[in-house]
Image (cartoon, rainbow, N blue to C red):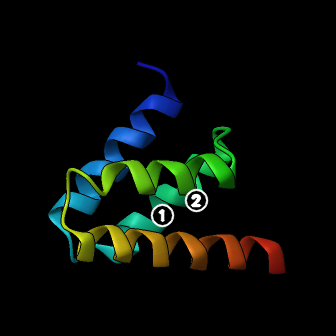
Amino acid sequence: MTFKQRELVTISIITAIGDADPMLKSHLGLSLNVGWSPERLNEFVNVITSTVSKEKSATAATVLKEVLKTRKSK
C-alpha cells in the first residue's frame, strides 16, 4: 500500500471510531502532505458517509474544513 492509500484507510478508521478529532485533523493534514488534493479529500469524506453514521461523516467534513482553512492562512 502507498502512503496515500494508507492515509485514506487511517482516516476512514478514525472517522468510524469517532471522538478522535485531533487524530483525524493530523491525518487529514498528512494526507495533504502525501499528495491528496483538498477536492479529493472532500470526495472521500462524502464516499465514507455510506459506511459510517452521518454524524461521524459530518464531523470529518468539519475537521477537513478546519484543516484546509488553517493551511490557507499560513
Nearest to the observer: residue 17 or residue 62: 62
Under circle 2, the secondary element is helix
In x, y percent, where is residue 6?
A: 40, 33
Q: Can I make out residue 74 in this image? A: no
Q: Quadrant of residue 42?
A: bottom right
Q: What kind of residue is marked 1?
A: Ser
5 vs 61: above or below: above
Question: As shown in the figure, which amino acid type bears the numbered disc 2?
Answer: Gly
The residue beneath circle 1 is 26
- Residue situated in front as seen by the camera: 25 or 42: 42
- Name above or below for residue 44 compared with residue 74: above
Q: Can you say which quadrant of the picture contains the N terminus?
A: top left
Query: Which mark, by number, is residue 29?
Result: 2
Q: Residues within 10 Å of mark 2 (few under 14, many from 20)?
A: some
Residue 52 location, x and y as percent? Answer: 20, 58
The part of the image, by quadrant, that contains residue 56 is: bottom left
Query: In what element is the residue under mark 1?
Result: helix
Q: Residue at x 30, y 57 (%)?
A: 49
Q: How far is disc 1 from disc 2 in space, using C-alphas?
A: 5 Å
Q: For mark 1, does the 10 Å Cα neighbourhood hold few (<14), some (14 to 19), or many (20 or more) residues? A: some
Q: Nearer the viewer, residue 52 or 28?
A: 52
User: Would residue 74 appear left or right of 38 to someone viewing this image?
Assistant: right
Question: Which residue shows up at 48% across the image and 75% down it?
Answer: 63
